[in-house]
Amino acid sequence: MVERCEETDDMAFRSDLKYSDVTPKADYLNRRQIMAAAGGAALGAIAGPALAASPYDTDLAPNTLEDITSYNNFYEFGTSKSDPARYAGALTTDPWSVRIDGLVERPGTYDLADLLKGMDIEERIYRFRCVEAWSMVVPWNGFQLSQLLEKVGVQSGAKYVYFETLVRPEEMPGQKRRLLDWPYREGLRLDEAMNPLTLIATGLYGEVLPNQNGAPLRLVVPWKYGFKSIKSIVRISLTDKQPPTTWNMQNPREYGFYSNVNPQVDHPRWSQATERRIGGGLFSRRQETLMFNGYGEWVADLYKGMDLAKYF
Ligand SMILES: Nc1nc2c(c(=O)[nH]1)N[C@H]1C(S)=C(S)[C@@H](COP(=O)(O)O)O[C@H]1N2
Ligand SMILES: [Mo]
């Protein structure tokens, strides 16, 4: 993201594309029905059962597991789209704990299992739009961030939620270089964090989340550019001030705190009006980018009265 729009990488990437990678929607629905029939019994506790369709689901066909797990941004493992798939397998995700602190009633370092206890894991099929102007459709499994925040108790003075990714250069080769100012950091306004669309993902396609996608816990904020969806979270902090965020720190002119998907506000170095759907095939047309990535019905009110060109 620092150097250039990934569109310039297109031809290199396209040569890897297999047409057979595209899973027809019908097959996927089938799989869903099979899982429903099994009552989720075959699934692990982390991935959880994926039964009812959520009202937030897109009708678009999900990308294949192959697309979703082989074309990634996760700079802790390197800057190339194939680095996470190559190197993230070596990351130890068990044991895992998350420090929850700041303006919360029950701060502490929570073991992953304790944190997940009682969380309602659902399937959510979301559009995913990277700031680099490519997109995918991902069938996540996860729970609403609001449920976790309710579990730990938000103090009345809290206005923002801040997140950090693990720092472990022995297992994250990208962290041996100063590609970014580690740890990777992200943040949301509290009302954005409490929105029912905002998810903590623990799985994909009904399986445990692959490491390259941010195991064991990653944020998913579908109306914002992908970089807000911070991976492999080890700290969640409630604050009264807007927290520092990695890409905004890196280049505040190019990456704002809000980073809502907005086809009318271009990145200084490329247009945000259209996007390339990964897995669409060599000759597929670019798609129009939708305001709030198509989730305006549920989130536009959060920004009423704000100048979205200024608060980009
Ligand atoms: N810790 C961390 N989280 C991260 C990133 C990263 O480099 N490090 N990349 C972000 C970007 S730019 C995108 S587009 C998404 C990619 O998610 P995916 O690989 O699951 O598609 O993860 C986001 N979360
Ligand atoms: Mo991204």
Image (cartoon, rainbow, N blue to C red):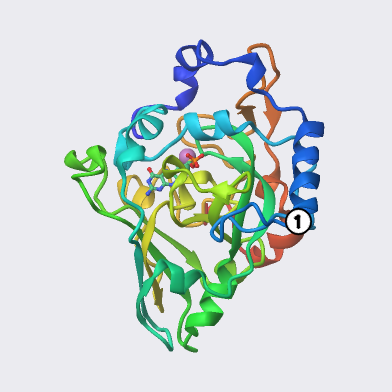
Q: Quadrant of residue 52?
A: bottom right
Residue 305 in sight = no
Query: 297 left or right of 187?
Result: right
State the residue in front, 236 or 249: 236
Residue topped by disc 1: 51
* 81 over 60 or under it: above or below: above
Residue 140 in sight = yes
- Percent position of residue 51, x then y: 76, 56
User: Which residue is drawn at the image coordinates 45% and 13% (left, top)?
Assistant: 12
- Percent position of residue 53, x then y: 79, 54
Q: Quadrant of residue 196?
A: bottom right
State the residue in front, 40 or 180: 40
Mark 1 closeness class: few <14, some 14–19, many ≥20 residues within 10 Å: some
Q: Quadrant of residue 31?
A: top right
SS for dot 1: loop
* 17 over 123 or under it: above or below: above
Ligand 1 located in image quadrant: top left
Q: Quadrant of the N terminus?
A: top left
User: Which residue is drawn at the image coordinates 23% and 38% (left, top)?
Assistant: 173
State the residue in front, 211 or 157: 211
User: Which residue is drawn at the image coordinates 82% and 33% (left, top)?
Assistant: 26
- Percent position of residue 73, x then y: 42, 37
* 166 over 8 or under it: above or below: below
Query: 51 left or right of 247?
Result: right
Query: 65 left or right of 86?
Result: right
Three-letter code for the amino acid on which mark 1 is drawn: Leu
Tell me if the residue at label 1 has its CB under 8 Å from ligand 1.
Answer: no
Query: 57 left or right of 274?
Result: right
- Percent position of residue 165, x then y: 34, 56
For the image, the number of numbered tags is: 1
User: Which residue is drawn at the image coordinates 36% and 27% (left, top)?
Assistant: 80
